[in-house]
Image: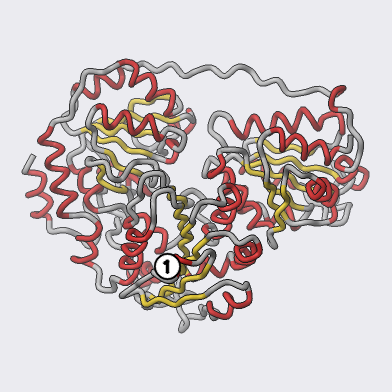
Amino acid sequence: MKASDYIVSYLAQNGVDVVFGYIGGMITHLVDSLGKSDKVKFVQTYHEQTASMAAEGYALESGKIGVAIATSGPGATNMATGIADAYFGNIPVLYITGQVNTYEYKYDKPIRQQGFQETDVVSIVKPITKYAVMVDKPEDLCFELEKAVHIATTGRKGPVLIDLPMNISRGDIYPDQMRHYKPEDAQKSKVDISLLTGALNGSKYPMVLVGGGCIDARKEVDAFVRKYNLPVVVSLMGKGLVDETYDNYLGMIGSYGNRCANLSFAKVDLLIALGSRLDTRQTGAKIDGFIPNGKIIHVDIDENELKCHRVSNRVLINADVVSFLSQVLEADISFGTDNVWLEWLHQLKQKYNQDCEVARFVSNKAPYMVMQELNKITKEGDIITADIGQNQMWAAQTIKVKPQQRFVTSGGLAPMGFSLPVAVGMAFANPSKTIYCINGDGGFHMAVQSLLLISQYNLNIKVIVMNNSALGMITQFQHLYFDSRMYATTQQGGYILPSLESIAKAYNLPYYQVDGSCPCFSREIQDGGCIVDCLIGERTVVSPKLEFDKPIYNMSPLLDNGEIESLCSQL
């Protein structure tokens, strides 16, 4: 059996029905095998970075492993951004890169390169993969392929890479006669429930923080917080993993969190952090201001994340969230949240929610009005993707995720140009879904090649461009810290934006222009794929924002000290 044919058949056996990539000389045999397959479709993505991120979207929506392929040298290095994003985002993706024939590869020779487009891809990606290997012996192919997929999809999930020399991919193998990978039986995490029960019983003001590690634990999280009537907040990567119609949901915490959610941390005395790294984007740089007089129950699947941390007042539980919460729910803890605490939180939510924030502190409300319009038109089951920058934070602060909806963004590597290709991958995984793909004008231009896939395959992706003709997040920094010198971020500083209407025409997509100050998407949502150019004005801000030297509960624009003291005195 030809090795490349075997790889395709193995992917099909694992439920993969789409592979993303860009053809090149060293990967041609694999593309040919995909082309002949009636079970696995090959999608030519016009750029390897698009392929690498589309595979992430496919994995997120399908629940299967994503797959992306590229040729040697520049094909492989072009995928590196997506590989790194999958690594920091805990997304299971198999990346296969073509490599020169083994007899052309330099191995240990002290030269830079021997074969044409030869590159030591494995060494490049080892820091950003769970596992990376060059298969240079045909008898190792089955073992390494099975091992890589197992590693990607178990434990803390993430990307793996197989570098495949051309003479291996085109050669014949005999799978029945080859060694195969046999994983060890996974051990279920056993949790000392008393660590939680003792902390809960001694707490007056508990809070649950849902992080990105809860992606497979939505049901358990919902059952847990509802059973004990617990208030809950999310991190950026936890956005969309909680039913936001839940009465005790406060919003997102962190550097650009919702003010009501961050304000609650002035009184929280027990934080149950589920699947969250508790990085500085969540805690703020002023670590001693993050639950200074309380305790954190820190639950994470990665023991290293628990051990290597600057926050000290933590009880460490090394377990996956599903296992932890399942055991907690079975234990039937006797506990109920104090109504006085919940009533105080509801007052915060009523007075300091995002709509109140915009009305009180934001002059140019257009960006937030666009997000409020999206809240009106999106339906249960829709997918919302957000890029990086101000558009991401407007969406995360304002979008109210409905039941069965998904909110997808990147919070680890956070590459501009993420939203479009990840939306493409999700559309291939589930063509019946409507996807609202939110972008800034900068990130949109970085991922412009993804647009052709929307029209080519008639994908139901509505590309929302928050167009302020600027790199808005950086201009906000430049206003604050650089005396408003707008180098490289505005037209005066050397940043310009091409005509979105002309781009839409070139990529055969309907184009609509919307005034962000009075947005109405009634026409646009009736179409399939389209581009909606939302003009929101040049001077835009994200509000609130946590400054470097402030505790999490005191965000800018700063509240008067008396206002915070008055709030806290009510408990």
The mark total stands at 1
Which sits in the foreground, 376 or 58? 376
Quarter residue 231 falls in: top left
Task: Residue at 18%, 33% (x, y): give it.
Answer: 205
User: Which quarter of the picture shows residue 547?
Assistant: bottom left
The vertical placement of 449 against 40, above or below, is below
Left or right, 68 with reference to 392: right
Which residue is situated farthest in the front direction here?
526
Tell me the residue at 12%/58% (across/down): 560
Q: Quadrant of residue 457?
A: bottom right
Left or right, 80 with respect to 537, comes to: right
What percent of the width, then of the height, locates residue 122? 73, 43
Report x, y in % for residue 149.
67, 33
* In-front residue for pair 53/200: 53
Q: From the top left corner, tell me how far across and down residue 138 is, in percent.
A: 87, 33
Residue type at numbered disc 1: Ile
Quadrant the N terminus occupies: top right
Residue denoted by label 1:
474
Residue at the image position 81 percent from the left and 56 percent from the top: 24
| Left or right, residue 25 beside residue 81 | right
Residue drawn at (81%, 22%) of the image? 179
Rendered position, 426 above or below 453: above
Vertical order, 351 against 279 (above or below)? below
Instruction: Provide residue 168's location: percent of width, then percent of height.
Output: 87, 40
Quarter of the figure with the C terminus: top left
Whether 336 is drawn above or below 282: the answer is above
